[in-house]
Amino acid sequence: MNQFQYVRPTKAQAAIDAVAKDANAAFIAGGTNLVDLMKRGVMTPQKLVDINRLPLRQIERVGTGLRIGALALNSAVADDRLVREKHPLLALALNAGASPQLRNMATVGGNMLQRTRCAYFYDVAMPCNKRQPGSGCGALEGINRMHAIFGFSDKCIAVHPSDMSVALVALDATVLLSGPKGDRKLAFADFHRLPGTTPERDTNLEPSELITAVEIPDSPFTRHVHYQKVRERASYAFALLSVAAALDLDGNTIKAARLAMGGVAHKPWRLAAAEQALVGQPATEAAFQRAAAVAMQGAKAFKHNEYKLRLGPNAIVQALKTAAAA
Amino acid sequence: MKTPEKHIGKPMNRVDGRQKVTGAATYSAEYELPGLVYAVLVGSTIAKGRLTGIDTKAAAGAPGVLAVVTHLNAPQTPGSKPTGKDPSQPQTTGSALRIFTDDQIRFNDQPIAVVVADTLERARYAARLVKGQYAPEKHQTNLEAGKAQAFLPTSAKKNPKSPMNDYQRGQADAYKTGAIKLEQEYVIPTEVHHPMELQAITAHWEAPDRLTLYDKTQGTMATRRDFAKEWGLPEENVKVIATFVGGAFGNALHSWPHESAAIIAAKVANRPVKLMLTREQMFTMVGYRPHTWQKVRMSATADGKITAITHESIGQTSTYEEFTESTLAQTRMMYQSPNLTTRYRLAALNVGSPIWMRGPGEATGAFALESAMDEMAYLLKLDPLEFRLRNYTEQDPETGKPWSSKFLKECYRLGAERVGWNQRQLAPGAVRDGDWLVGYGMGVGTFGAHRGSSKASARLLPNGTVLLQSAVTDIGPGTGTAMTQIAADTLGLAPAKIRFEWGNSDFAQAPTQGGSAIVNTVGPAVQEVCLALKDKLRELAGAGNAAFASAKKEDVIFADDHLTLSGNDTARASYADLVKQAGGTAVTVQSKPNGENGQKYSMYSFSVHFAQVRVHVLTGEVRVSKLVSCADAGTIINEKTAGNQMKGGAVGGIGMALMEHAIIDDRFGRYVTKDLADYHVPVHADAPDIQVAFVNQPDPYVNALGTKGIGEIATIGVAPAIANAVFNATGKRVRELPITPDKLV
């Protein structure tokens, strides 16, 4: 681990200023990912701006939605009464992630900013365009069983590892940001980026911009929801892939649907066409299968992740079945 | 007359349980010596080639750095042979890799330097500043490619009696002419031990020629021998302390390069040095269960009698050491096949050396053999348990000798009943519960029951308590607890009055903990030293009291802190008084290996594991919903710790079956699984409530206690039981572990 300065401001503006002043500064909240990356030399900030003292932990009703402070702990959000009542999908996704110990440290903002778990990114002795632009993508021709089937480029085929973000993109959340140029809002779907030619950029955050909150609008998706995470052990594993599914049912007819996948792309992957394909359909396995087929259009596998082309539609069907029965 | 309470067999709590759960137990990285400094290893970034240069300037100048040691400036260690001169020969220390002695790179992440600094963080930072320059050569890390050059181990070539030689009974490759034939290949990937405690050592040169090591090792005496030899010191000048070991599963069975590095670093820095590996380094330099390819060909009569088996195996090893294990041992003796052929080969790759991992080769071999048994039973349309019973052996078909004891049929009966084997359907995929397919499978395990040589010392203290000492380690099975129970019953003392100390090379000689042999070996030594202590006490009592002197040996009663005589109410000698009378009393005994019994009988522990699994029809996820492990392990000294061992071994088997898989990117010869997020071991949610049953029948020949050993048979056979259950649930046969969802969906 390199030597670094450490400051702990109490006001958001001071934190933003502290990062803005220093090109090698980074915010730190729960530290559940950044500290690991620093130990391995993958990230080497010269200054850490600890934001845990900022007043950004509130979970509250705002207008016709719910605002969740960026520093709200994953465990606190998952256990929150309002969250469970209005957005049970989010609670399910959060509880599918990591372990209780990590959820007790990790924050909402930090969860969104998790770096990929691609092994080539983590090993400074291997090529990785995300870690070291221009060094090449180790995974492209390497071990890529965990990698993307959507939205990748020849520069990067890594996936975003967050479970929470898959639910948030499905729920049409909005991200609240504060930066040197003031405050702004960004649709959650626009927060993470596809790798393109600049895989070193995970998100559309501007330099020294701080996530202050996430807002989720009220929706009818309060009951028929499911987060299907397929992983190699029963708990505490990143997803081979995951599906967030939400249905608004009128009797057995689907009035509206939300679908998103995790573990398949550089960002949480919203499946808008598949959602459309469900609207007006009966909530039957046949309809779910048709939607799953739509969802998988354009998917392309690499040497070791061909299974995702079979697992993806299956997981979508399973998620929708479980959601419909919920 | 009161019969002393018996402790053997009781589920006594661990004698060190409180220390462990309260954090009072001190592990090898937790000794805070005055002046302690920290060492971090720098690993190579190529898999094969030569170090043409190494830039240590920046590291040496970094804050707090005390030393940077490489092959260019390392002190000479007089006892070392060069690496790889003869890979078939054991080297000075357990690991054949002599670090810092040449410029050759033999595997990726091979230590090329050690950095010593005043804090761990500074050492870690400086280690990153060390830059090796390499002349890379073409490496090979792929077993499939390496198979083409597979070879018979040199030890087998040199010694016709080596069990690594080709084995033959009856006709060679007779499977070709059988009525029902099976021919399949099975692969297990590299699996890594990954005990919770990382490999760690604190090395302290107490004088220029006196070394104390607080070391994670399974053998204090072997480690002492290794490093005394490496540094050309008399063994008594080296002391190795390993009181607590946070799991090992085999990866501390011999010493490793990081231990050499810490000792060198301590010498150069002239300070006590602590070196703890990172989780990444646990993959590369302290061994693993080797990636192994196997082929089983089997034939049987239509009524289910095996007529021939040919079992071949090629296991991965390094280029500098021929690591061998008993992958094919179970095949040779488990079933009554008149014709049997085994062939064991190695493939040398540019990787670090493997080391025995729990159940070792037998667990690898059992995956192939027990899977093949299930496949053959399916071809025969026979219940797999019935198929095994039709080929049951009443004597060892390999040697023709009688078993010292074998209660495997009882294990079958117990396990089948508990798992509900009668629910199993012969046709796969026949049972569905909602979105889950349900299936049952079984797998058998066996491991040699050996007794080695050991000493033990016993001292009666003036307060009437007994202090026992042994150099043995306790890597988790509860050795200290079992020994206390054995001593309590032999002496007639309450366990609270006995203190068994272990994990120190200065204590009475004991073997390295491994091979399921510790209770078999150290147990009798403890029993014998307690008997010797009683002889001595009888003698002392006789000197002070004529009634004892004239009494027959069997009339002297040892109980409740004192001696009495049968039929004599007045004769009484308290242990405390006897100690006072003698001015302290201590005995040491040497306990011997099996000897003649070992020649006359085939000695094995046996186990069977029954699994019920659920496989999700859409996602391919496998959940082990029931696991029943039954063992014929002779006398059970402690039902609780023995049960713990069986459960732990079963969980290891779940990992082997369903998730453990260390993956190398062959282009770089470098692991892409580098932590416990990439390399999965089971979490609690992956383990059902594992049921354990022991036959608990003493073996008459292994030793006087009747024990046979548990550690390995707890794991051997679990993985095939699960794989067979997955087949029964789904009709899909996975012959390459682990059985991850991608293979079933």
Image (spheres, rainbow, N blue to C red):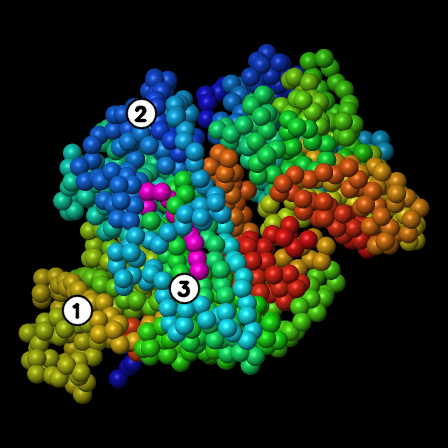
Q: Chain letter of disc 3? A: B
Q: Residue at x 41, y 69 (%)?
A: B172
Q: Chain letter of disc 2? A: B
Find residue B68 and name its label: 2
* Amino acid at the residue labelled 3: Thr
Which residue is labeled 1 in the image?
B533
Which residue is labeled 3 in the image?
B342
Residue B622 visible, this orientation: yes
Q: Position of residue A4 (x, y in %)?
A: 48, 20
Closer to the camera, B46 or B339?
A: B339
* Amino acid at the residue labelled 2: Val
Query: Image height check: is B346 above or below A87?
Result: below
- Report the magenta residues as a range: B312-321
Mark 1 to mark 3 CA distance (whole Å): 49 Å
Q: Residue at x 23, y 51 (%)?
A: B221
For residue B555, side relative to residue B199 (left or right):
left
Q: Position of residue B374 (x, y in %)?
A: 56, 69
For residue B43, side relative to residue B668 (left or right):
left
Numbered disc 2: secondary structure: strand
Q: Quadrant of residue B310?
A: bottom left
Q: Which of the two discs, 1 and 3, labels the residue nearer the N terminus?
A: 3
Mark 2 to mark 3 CA distance (whole Å): 49 Å
Is residue A6 found inside the magenta-colored segment of the image? no
Numbered disc 3: secondary structure: strand
Residue B686 visible, this orientation: no
Q: Residue at x 60, y 72 (%)?
A: B379
